[in-house]
Amino acid sequence: MNTKYIRTHKKIIQKGMQLLFSDEFDKVSVPMICEQAGISRPTFYSHFKCKEQLVAEYYGASFFLNQEKIRWVTSAPDYWTSIIRIQLLYIRHTCNPEQAELISQSLSYQLTEQQPESVREYNSLHQEMLLQFIKKAQMEGSVLNRSDPFYLCKSVSMLQTGNLFLWCTDNGRFDQFTNFFWNLEAVLCVNNAYRGLWKSEISFIPDFPSEEQPDTEGFS
């Protein structure tokens, strides 16, 4: 994907979300986002069909990852714990009670619209990392499901969407961590020696600075 396009795309999302975090969704217009981002309306519409798509990409993309978070994820003692950590960060990014209205808008858009290939490519860091962790967890024996890692990764994505849907419909009262990780252990057939490790990981998530754009440096 064109580097200039990606930079502009990220900038529109960042500036747009700054406005949406500070005001109600219906009060933030596309012209306001354009002014904040220093772009024209045609430029906005060359990247997004609507502001709902912008919000959906923020929560669906890898905006919850930066160098510090990637280091924490990849420094885990085993690959199953790396899977736990990256999913903990994703859940914390998407299940934020203070952003419930925006998250509902995001989920609604994701469930009704098909994202173009260019957007899926832009959103791929989380999935790329997860896919590698699943492959290596199979080799180390923490994940016993020997199905194609690509399809296991897709199954985890569906679990994420279902978990978020339940959280939204229950107005944020749903225990998103317990439900997700119980199902994740079942889908991946996690070795008994590794089951329940997510409970201790929840208690020790570091205090990271505010979320920023994804940064792939330091990950391979």
Image (tube, grey):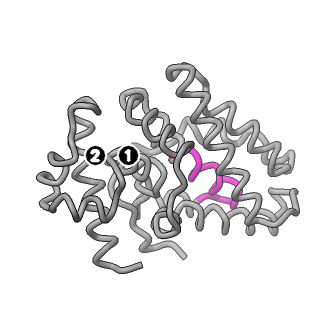
- Rendered image: mark on residue 112: none
Q: What residue lies at 39% left-to-right and 29% top-to-bottom?
A: 101
Which residue corresponds to the image point at 65% horizontal and 59% vertical from the top-left? 77
Quarter holding the N terminus is: bottom left
* Residue 55 tag number: 1
Q: Main secondary structure of the magenta part?
A: helix
Dots 2, 1 in contact, CB < 8 A: yes
Q: How far is mark 2 from mark 1, CA to CA? A: 7 Å
The three-letter amino acid code for the residue at tag 1 is Val
**Of the residues under marks 2 and 1, which one precedes in the sequence?**
2
Horizontal side, residue 65 vs residue 180: left or right: left
Task: Say which quadrant the C terminus sits in.
Answer: bottom right
Q: Pick the residue in front: 24 or 205.
A: 24
Tell me: residue 135, above or below residue 210: below
Q: Amino acid at mark 2?
A: Met
Q: Quadrant of residue 182?
A: top right
